[in-house]
């Protein structure tokens, strides 16, 4: 049972450090309490990564959050590549690996895009992915990431009709980061996409 009096005492915006001081407990105990309250529906989160993570605590249960990009990526990613959300990304309605992969590319984040490679093994609707990518003008990048992913993990095959790589304009997966790893040169040439990853980065995807 959740202590309502305790909830009323700590209700509001809190960091783990603030909560530890207020309750005169250790920081780890505060984190454990927050985790428990979050599971029960009393806590939502903003921040993370390089920013301080702030928790909004309410004495009444909050509406169950909708899944977003970070949730989907972390669901399928390795332990080494779990992503700390730096903003609260939620999407109402249908949202799955196809949408998350498109949004990951849009972040221009090295770590998010790297972690998103695992999503290829959970793509079930290739027409949807193709159409979403065409809308965002990023099918070229999807194709390059697909070829990278299949070098390191077992993934579902892309239907041949979507293997269109007749592109004229060179693009960057992440702005201004050129390809340095020789093993990716053929993919770069095929899709005309500059790939910022090194082999060591990809090893983190499979462990």
Image (cartoon, grey):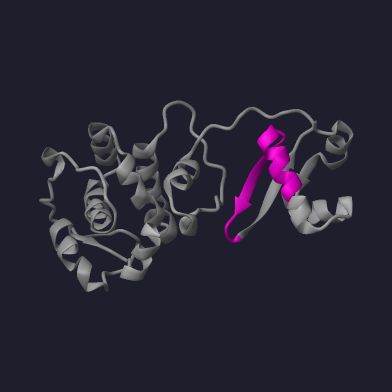
Point out the image quarter for the C terminus: bottom left
Residue 175 point in image, percent of width and height: 34, 62
Q: Nearer the viewer, residue 28 or 115?
A: 28
Residue 95 appears left or right of 58: left
* The residue stretch that appears in magenta: 32-50
Residue 136 point in image, percent of width and height: 30, 42
**Residue 35 sits inside the magenta stretch:** yes
**Residue 117 sits inside the magenta stretch:** no
The quadrant in which residue 113 appears is bottom left
The quadrant in which residue 152 appears is bottom left
Q: Residue at x 56, y 52 (%)?
A: 86
Q: Residue at x 79, y 41 (%)?
A: 12
Q: Which residue is drawn at 57% across and 43% down?
A: 88
Q: Which residue is drawn at 28% across and 69% down?
A: 178
Residue 40 appears left or right of 124: right
Residue 92 appears left or right of 51: left
Residue 65 point in image, percent of width and height: 58, 32
């Amino acid at each position: 049972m959740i202590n309502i009096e305790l909830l009323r005492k700590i209700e509001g915006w809190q960091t783990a450090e603030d909560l530890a001081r207020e309750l005169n407990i250790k920081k780890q105990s505060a984190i454990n309490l927050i985790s428990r309250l979050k599971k029960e529906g009393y806590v939502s989160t903003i921040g993370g990564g390089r920013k301080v993570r702030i928790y909004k605590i309410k004495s009444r249960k909050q509406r169950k959050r909708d899944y977003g990009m970070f949730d989907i990526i972390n669901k399928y990613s390795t332990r080494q590549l779990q992503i700390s959300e730096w903003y609260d990304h939620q999407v109402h309605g249908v949202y799955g690996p196809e949408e998350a992969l498109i949004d990951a590319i849009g972040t221009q984040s090295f770590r998010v895009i790297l972690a998103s490679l695992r999503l290829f093994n959970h793509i079930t609707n290739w027409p949807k992915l193709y159409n979403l990518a065409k809308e965002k003008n990023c099918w070229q990048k999807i194709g390059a990431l697909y070829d990278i992913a299949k070098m390191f993990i077992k993934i579902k095959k892309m239907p041949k009709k979507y293997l269109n790589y007749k592109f004229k304009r060179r693009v960057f997966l992440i702005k201004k980061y050129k390809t340095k790893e020789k093993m990716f040169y053929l993919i770069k040439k095929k899709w005309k996409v500059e790939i910022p990853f090194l082999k060591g980065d990809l090893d983190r995807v499979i462990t």
